[in-house]
Image (cartoon, helix red, strand yellow):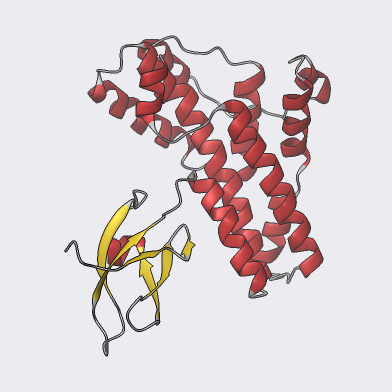
Amino acid sequence: MNGFPVTRIKQAGYENIVVECPWCGRENIFNRASDLRTFKPIAVLDVSCQNVECGKPFRIVGDSVNERHEMLIFDCYELLKRKQYMNCILTLTQAYEVFFSLFLRVELLYKPFARDGGEDINCLNRLAEMLIKKVERCTFVPMRKLFLQQIIAAPRPANLAEAETLIANLEVPSCEPTDTELERLDDEELVALLKGVKNTTIHKLRNAVVHKRAYRPTREETEAALEETRLLLSRLTNRLGLHDDITLYRKQS
């Protein structure tokens, strides 16, 4: 296997990776679920060309290590290029929802688990199921309310016992925080980003696309939504230190 030619991944998407076969030059599309059967970032993997006339083995490297919501955003550039504006809006809205979900997992599961010594996996899994049930029916606006409320008002659980209490009592706020409440954070950069999330109307555009109107957005609308989403979520991800990797938080504690 050591003699295989190596090729870098051409496009590392959320669902698929695209590579060119170094033998025949044919483009190969490998689905992460069906073909590769792994969702972990690929450092090195040996595959065979999907072209039946070739079928030769080669090695792929250079997968994305971005968070899931970031990968969804990056997928939108390809959708934009193909003028699939409706799908782009759907994917951008999904990226927000995935981001909100990641934030809740980090604050209510990963960090308390790490602070607790990072050993009680059974308790962690049980709380993860509790959290899933709490938010499984939440759409964009309820998830946004939970995200904003968790930042400005919710206590930070010091251990899994406190996290369990918070998750058990987790309720969607009746309304989103006012700008004045956000400004009490006394962090101009963070407040500006949170206001951006609070004021985005991407979900309304998504609803127009998926409901009976089947609205077809323009390129200008789609480009604006993509740029807004990319800037807000990438900066918030860095600012809040969000990673879907529990071992990272264990190392930091």
Which residue is found at the position 33% from the left and 50% from the top? 43
Q: Is residue 114 left or right of residue 229?
A: left
Is 126 above or below relative to 216?
Answer: above
Point out the image quarter for the C terminus: top left
Q: Left or right: where does residue 217 sit relative to residue 100?
A: right
**Quadrant of the image occupied by residue 205:** bottom right
Occupied quadrant, residue 120: top left
Nearer to me, 45 or 39: 45
Residue 80 lies, in percent from the top left, at 66, 68
Quadrant holding the N terminus: bottom left
Residue occupying image coordinates x 26% and y 87%: 52
Q: How many marks?
A: 0
Residue 52 vertical position relative to residue 220 in the rendered view, above or below: below
Q: Quadrant of residue 223?
A: bottom right
Residue 188 position within the rendered picture, expressed as x and y whole percent measured from the top left: 79, 22
Q: Residue 200 location in percent, x, y? A: 75, 44
Comparing 250 with 44, the one in front is 44
Image point (63%, 22%), residue name:
151
Q: Is residue 220 above or below residue 48?
A: above
